Image: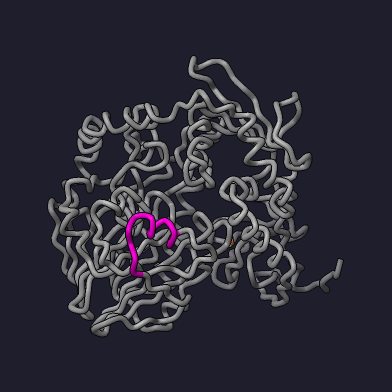
């Protein structure tokens, strides 16, 4: 099996029975904030796009690049489609001209022509990607590969059960706006960033240990930030709180925990994987490339400047009455929302900075009051401050997912009272009836589902499944003193009270092993 690195989470898998192109991403994403790193725009995409199968793991724009798919990927390719709850991905791909779809039944091996086998695991909670993320398992001629991508399943047992895996591709770096955009003192930001960076690595080690593949390929990040306004997010400034470590940092951190089987794929690197080993060739030596990282980024920044300027010029739509449009789009959804609105539990304020850089219009999405209205000097749960032009653009194009556009752009600042609230972001990625109903139904089912099994961790008996997204705490749970940490997303719980210390709600059931449980 041959794997060609094509940048970020993208790769092309070639076997004698067919080729699969995964997640090709070249054009900037999220308001021109994210670019693929290292640059992959100079690859021979005409040739790479001439494939038998296309796999897009999910709809995040650093995985689903509509313009690139339209222009470069063969429309004769069969799309390997994850079993997502909504038809959005298929609809979008049909719009781009794809007509052949293989809807892969969830977690079931499918044999394609010539003995090529695939299995796709679709994750479908409202917090997985833009309502859905997935991983692709491939087997040909005894060689097995898992492209886990940036998906975060509770464990990898469904793949491990299919036999020893030879190549494991997975995310290790950050892909979020936390904590950089928060209005916090620098020292706090650095401390939170460092915690986040450590957690990302811990999670990665855990997945690697779960699968014990022969070779581990760090993929799916980090992106690079080429706009001058965002340049500080690149991990080139010696900031230990930067959440975007690159592949060379992965190798050195992995070595510290005893990892010796890491393989970096640059765009254009080719790995030949067999049951007995892997040999990889690179367009330039990997160490040399990372030693020149700053020069690479600076050159790319100059080359992409016109692209960023052109994008910026398209955001302004002064004819949009932001308050009225937000009322029209969001108020009906607030009416429909039970779990998300209750979960947010308070007003969320948007401060919009106008073209002059100063004038601010303050709009409140009032979840308890189910209305959108001007800010009225009240206490709010969250406050976001961003350029008015960005919101105008989202309203102008009818964007239904403000996470997959505004929030991932990092072109805002934020403040909040209290803990992280996942419902805020779940709501703003569900600005359509179809999405909102799905998310509401998901929370409804999960609120009602009983979770009776308990396990013992240290001195405590706790429920087996994490109250967040059901990770198996026998694998992911760590108890230190009276505190439980679930390593899948790093959420913490106070065991004595059951209270989640990371996010509102999500109480854990727990009691001391030497005490009788209370039923209250
Ligand atoms: S499943 Fe997310 S922290 Fe446990």
Q: Is residue 80 left or right of residue 187?
A: left
User: How many numbered discs, if any?
Assistant: 0
In this view, the residue in front, 397 or 197, is: 397
- Does 348 sit above or below residue 478? above
Residue 370 place in picture, x, y as percent: 75, 41
Q: Decide whether residue 289 is among the magenta residues.
A: no
Report the residue at 43% width, 62% height from top.
90
Q: Is residue 480 something that shows in the picture? A: no
Residue 259 place in picture, x, y as percent: 33, 64
Q: Is residue 463 left or right of residue 291?
A: right
- Does 471 sit above or below residue 410? below
Q: Which portion, as a residue range, is magenta?
A: 89-100
Report the residue at 53% width, 20% height from top.
354
- The quadrant in which the N terminus is found is bottom left
Q: Decide whether residue 97 is among the magenta residues.
A: yes
Q: Quadrant of residue 241?
A: top left
Report the residue at 25% width, 66% height from top.
76
- Does 80 sit above or below residue 48? below
Q: Quadrant of residue 444?
A: bottom right
- The quadrant in which the C terminus is found is bottom right
- Does 74 sit above or below residue 390? below
Residue 257 place in picture, x, y as percent: 38, 61
In this view, the residue in front, 360 or 39, is: 360
Residue 37 place in picture, x, y as percent: 28, 46
Report the residue at 30% width, 57% height from top.
10
């Amino acid at each position: 099996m041959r794997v060609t690195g094509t940048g970020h989470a993208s790769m092309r898998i070639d076997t004698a029975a067919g080729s699969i192109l995964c997640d090709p991403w070249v054009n900037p994403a999220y308001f021109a904030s994210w670019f693929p790193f290292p640059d992959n725009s100079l690859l021979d995409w005409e040739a790479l796009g001439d494939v038998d199968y296309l796999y897009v793991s999910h709809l995040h724009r650093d995985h689903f690049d509509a313009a690139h798919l339209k222009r470069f990927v063969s429309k004769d390719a069969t799309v390997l489609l994850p079993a997502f709850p909504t038809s959005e991905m298929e609809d979008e791909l049909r719009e781009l001209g794809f007509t052949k779809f293989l809807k892969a039944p969830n977690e079931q091996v499918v044999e394609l022509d010539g003995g090529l086998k695939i299995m796709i695991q679709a994750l479908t909670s409202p917090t997985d990607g833009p309502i859905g993320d997935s991983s692709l398992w491939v087997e040909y001629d005894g060689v097995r590969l898992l492209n886990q991508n940036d998906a975060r399943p509770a464990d990898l047992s469904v793949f491990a059960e299919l036999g020893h895996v030879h190549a494991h591709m997975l995310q290790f770096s950050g892909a979020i706006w936390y904590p950089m955009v928060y209005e916090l003192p620098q020292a706090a930001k650095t401390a939170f960033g460092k915690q986040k960076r450590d957690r990302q690595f811990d999670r990665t080690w855990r997945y690697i240990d779960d699968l014990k593949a022969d070779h581990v390929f760090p993929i799916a990040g980090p992106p690079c930030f080429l706009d001058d306004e965002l340049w500080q997010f690149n991990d080139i400034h010696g900031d230990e709180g930067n959440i975007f470590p690159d592949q060379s940092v992965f190798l050195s951190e992995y070595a510290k925990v005893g990892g010796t089987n890491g393989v970096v794929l640059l765009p254009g690197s080719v790995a030949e994987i067999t049951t007995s080993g892997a040999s990889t060739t690179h367009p330039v030596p990997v160490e040399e490339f990372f030693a020149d990282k700053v020069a690479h980024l600076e050159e790319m920044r100059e080359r992409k400047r016109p692209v960023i300027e052109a994008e910026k010029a398209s955001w302004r739509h002064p004819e949009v009455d932001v308050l009225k449009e937000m009322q029209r789009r969001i108020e009906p959804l607030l009416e429909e929302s039970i779990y998300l609105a209750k979960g947010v539990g308070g007003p969320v304020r948007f401060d919009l900075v106008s073209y002059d850089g100063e004038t601010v219009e303050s709009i409140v999405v009032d979840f308890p009051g189910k209305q959108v209205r001007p800010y009225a000097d009240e206490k709010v749960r969250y406050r976001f401050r961003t350029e008015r032009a960005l919101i105008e653009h989202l309203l102008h194009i009818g964007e239904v997912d403000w996470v997959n556009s505004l929030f991932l752009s990092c072109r805002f600042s934020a403040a909040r009272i209290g803990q992280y609230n996942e419902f805020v972001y779940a709501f703003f990625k569900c600005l359509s009836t179809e999405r909102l109903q799905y998310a509401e139904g998901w929370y409804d089912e999960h609120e009602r589902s009983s979770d009776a099994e308990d396990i013992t961790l240290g001195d405590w008996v706790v429920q087996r499944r994490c109250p967040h997204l059901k990770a198996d705490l026998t694998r992911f749970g760590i108890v230190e003193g009276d505190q439980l940490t679930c390593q899948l997303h790093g959420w913490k719980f106070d065991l004595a009270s059951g209270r989640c210390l990371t996010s509102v709600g999500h109480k854990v059931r727990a009691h001391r092993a030497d005490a009788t449980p209370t039923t209250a």
